[in-house]
Image: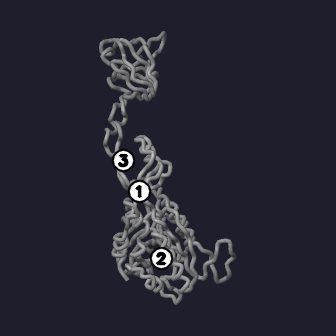
């Protein structure tokens, strides 16, 4: 059995690159960018009006002129026009190129337009209401770094630089495996000694939140059947997530099956609660990474967020943020285990306040619906009310 920090480091040290692929822009949402994106032109690409009104030369106003002849209209998307005389002006629409010879835009609300003339109603400032060329970004500057997860804003930037296709990180192929004769299908009425599958659905839903697809497989408590099924799964997937079958029970065959399949054990059992029997390993020939979580729902769910999420982020080059929260009540960890407390975190006047939710052990599936994070409490450490503790957020449960 190893300490939590060592287990976490060993998992992250086995992060791997799954390669890259080019996809059309419309299929890039929620994927991880694999290339830096540079501006193909200045942003904005020209001096542009930011208000509907008139473009004029400020020197005319400074010289005492308050009324200007309107000579033309400049619309957004039309070629640049030229002001012939500084005692004239050109009507401009928002987004239009600033006409040559002008340096100031006055919005309609500060004008009186009558008989083809524009009268200034308020004092003006030179250069007002103009978005100057290159003030956002200059040509060649990096707008997006590789490793960014592509959201709607990033899609807009990619479109603005003309990226019809985007180089993204490949996602791993994943198989979620449930084990145990006590598990039955959702539509089936369980016998008194059976339960419906839940872990596999929780894991698949969490993977969807990360933009990942997965296959689900169930194996019975039969060693030969388990070995045969896992041999095929390992050969055809980059990642295998299992729940159950890794403790000390007589039907917990996974450790011996992994050994028979030449899966290299990185570690088995971690000094933590929940999730102590966690097994982690790799099949070097197939290149498959295997996370075998304990079967209790809270243990499976916690270990997925504690280990798999940062492992995948590291593999894809995405930063995993760390969150510190303030304890609403004191908590003392007298054990030699790292504790992961289920908690509800709320934002109270800008401070993240964590209230531990006391579950009925690692089998308390219902308690998971009440929480949005796990508080990480090191061994032999006590926290007072109001002290900070690290929090691991839960996918799909925002901390507001």
Residue in the image at 36% along x and 36% along y: 43
In the displayed structure image, the side of residue 138 where residue 398 appears, left or right:
right
Q: Are marks 2 and 3 in contact (CB under 8 Å)?
A: no
In the displayed structure image, the side of residue 120 where residue 253 appears, left or right:
right
**For mark 1, does the 10 Å Cα neighbourhood hold few (<14), some (14 to 19), or many (20 or more) residues?**
few
Residue 282 visible to an observer of this rendering: no
Q: Nearer the viewer, mark 1 or mark 3?
A: 3
**Which of the marked residues, 2 or 3, is nearer the chain's N terminus?**
3
Residue located beneath label 3 in the image: 37
Q: Position of residue 347 (x, y in %)?
A: 45, 56
Closer to the camera, 149 or 379?
Answer: 149
**Distance from the alpha carbon under mark 2 to that under mark 1:** 33 Å
Q: Position of residue 166 (x, y in %)?
A: 43, 50
Q: Is residue 144 above or below residue 339?
A: above
Question: Where, quadrant-wise, is the N terminus in this rendering?
Answer: bottom left
Q: Is residue 183 above or below residue 237?
A: below
Closer to the camera, 369 or 276?
Answer: 276
Residue located beneath label 1 in the image: 351
**For mark 2, does the 10 Å Cα neighbourhood hold few (<14), some (14 to 19), or many (20 or more) residues?**
many
Secondary structure of the residue carrying tag 2 is strand
Residue 64 visible to an observer of this rendering: yes
Residue 334: which disc? none
Q: Is residue 193 above or below residue 387?
A: below
Residue located beneath label 2 in the image: 293
């Amino acid at each position: 059995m190893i300490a939590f920090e060592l287990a976490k480091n060993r998992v992250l040290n086995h992060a791997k690159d799954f390669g890259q692929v080019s996809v059309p822009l419309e299929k890039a949402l929620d994927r991880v960018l694999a290339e830096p994106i540079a501006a193909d032109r200045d942003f904005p690409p020209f001096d542009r009006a930011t208000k509907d009104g008139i473009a004029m030369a400020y020197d005319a106003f400074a010289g005492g002129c308050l009324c200007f002849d309107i000579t033309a209209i400049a619309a957004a998307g039309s070629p640049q026009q030229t002001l012939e005389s500084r005692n004239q002006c050109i009507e401009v629409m928002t987004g239009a190129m600033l006409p040559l010879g002008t340096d100031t835009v006055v919005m309609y609300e500060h004008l009186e337009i009558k008989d083809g003339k524009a009268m200034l109603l308020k004092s003006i400032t030179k250069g007002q209401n103009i978005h100057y060329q290159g003030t956002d970004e200059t040509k060649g500057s990096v707008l997006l770094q590789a490793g960014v997860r592509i959201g709607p804003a990033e899609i807009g930037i990619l479109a603005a630089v003309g990226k019809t296709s985007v180089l993204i990180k490949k996602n791993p192929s994943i198989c979620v495996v449930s084990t145990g004769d006590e598990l039955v299908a959702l539509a089936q009425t369980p016998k008194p000694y059976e339960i419906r599958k839940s872990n596999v659905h929780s894991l698949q839903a969490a993977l969807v939140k990360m933009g990942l697809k997965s296959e689900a497989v169930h194996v019975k408590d039969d060693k030969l059947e388990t070995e045969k099924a896992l041999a095929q799964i390992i050969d055809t997937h980059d990642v295998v997530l299992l729940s159950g079958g890794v403790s000390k029970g007589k039907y917990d065959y996974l450790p011996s099956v992994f050994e028979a399949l030449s899966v290299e054990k990185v570690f088995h059992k971690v000094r933590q609660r929940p999730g102590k029997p966690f097994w982690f390993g790799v099949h070097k020939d197939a290149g498959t990474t295997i996370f075998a979580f304990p079967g209790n729902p809270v243990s499976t769910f916690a270990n997925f967020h504690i280990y798999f999420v940062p492992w995948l982020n590291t593999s894809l080059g995405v930063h995993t943020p760390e969150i510190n929260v303030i304890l609403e009540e004191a908590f003392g960890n007298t054990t030699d285990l790292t504790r992961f407390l289920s908690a509800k975190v709320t934002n109270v006047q800008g401070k993240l306040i964590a209230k531990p939710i006391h579950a009925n052990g690692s089998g308390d599936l219902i308690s998971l619906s009440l929480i949005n994070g796990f508080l990480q409490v090191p061994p032999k450490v006590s926290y007072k009310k109001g002290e900070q503790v690290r929090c691991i957020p839960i996918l799909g449960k925002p901390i507001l």
